[in-house]
Image (cartoon, rainbow, N blue to C red):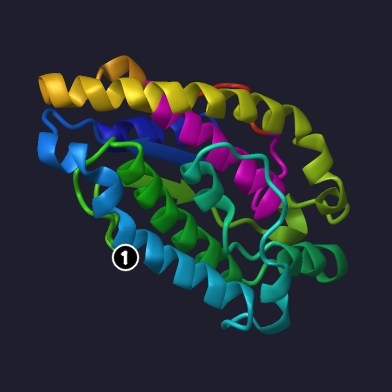
Amino acid sequence: MTTQLEQQAVGRGYPLTFFVDYPERLSRPKTAFRLILAIPILVMVAVLVGFHDFGGPGGLTDTWAVEPYFSVTVPNFLITAGLLVLAPRLMILFRRKYPRWWFDWNLQLLRFQNRVSVYLLLLRDEYPSTDDEQAVHLNMRYPDARTELNRWLPLVKWLLAIPHYLILFLLGLVSLVAVVIAWFAILITGRYPRVLFDFFVGFLRWNNRVTAYALVLTTDQYPPFRMRP
């Protein structure tokens, strides 16, 4: 089902797709103690982001890897932390190139951070893997920088995305309440309310699209103001 939805989304032309498989049942104990169970993976994320930002594989570019980003919840923050941002921006501007390994780093880091976000939002019980896709499906098309990316847009994309930031800020406030409701619902029924599940998947999808456009710069296509694929 996910593959079919992804194909439909790609057919509509947006270069980033995001889906999460809906779980039929969720573990009540794992949900009840989720924040405690998540501590090891959060420590790993902190080490990964810290290493990358201050002298990791990307050299001097790592110091500028994180840009200010409007976020309310931990998942929102994790989606932007550690990404290579300034280096691709400068490369597109001056050389009209987007090195493939920079793209691969951003894609794999986004995938990992989204698995952590999904886990923290109680959407899945699987402990976040550092490399396996699991039930979280994020795909981003590699751009031809010379023919598909305007060399000057990287200078203003962060400004053009401000309306999205404001809406995501408000959705982040709503998500704080929604995740508490979902927590109680899972403890009582063992299931994630489908309406709330779709809300969070849509919220993360929107967030990822804005990240692809304004931060990692893999597309010039302006993100749609919607949660659905």
**96 sits to left or right of 57:** right
Question: SS of the residue at dot 1?
Answer: loop
Question: Could you say which quadrant of the image residue 191 lies in?
Answer: top left
Residue of label 1: 131
* As drawn, 66 above or below 136: below
Residue in the picture at 30% in, 38% down: 3
Choose top left, top right, bottom left or bottom right for residue 91.
bottom right
**Depth check: 92 or 60 in front?**
60
Question: What residue is rendered at 27% in x and 51% in y?
Answer: 36
The residue located at (87%, 69%) in the rendering is 94
Residue 174 or residue 59, whichever sits in front = 174
Give, as a three-letter code, the residue at label 1: Asp
Task: Decide: is 208 above or below 169.
Answer: below
Q: Which residues are magenta?
A: 198-222
- Say if the magenta span includes residue 105: no
Picture layout, residue 171 above or below residue 110: above
Residue 213 in picture, x, y percent from top left: 67, 44
* Nearest the eye: 206 or 175: 175
Q: Is residue 16 visible?
A: yes
Q: Residue 206 placed where, x, y %?
A: 55, 32
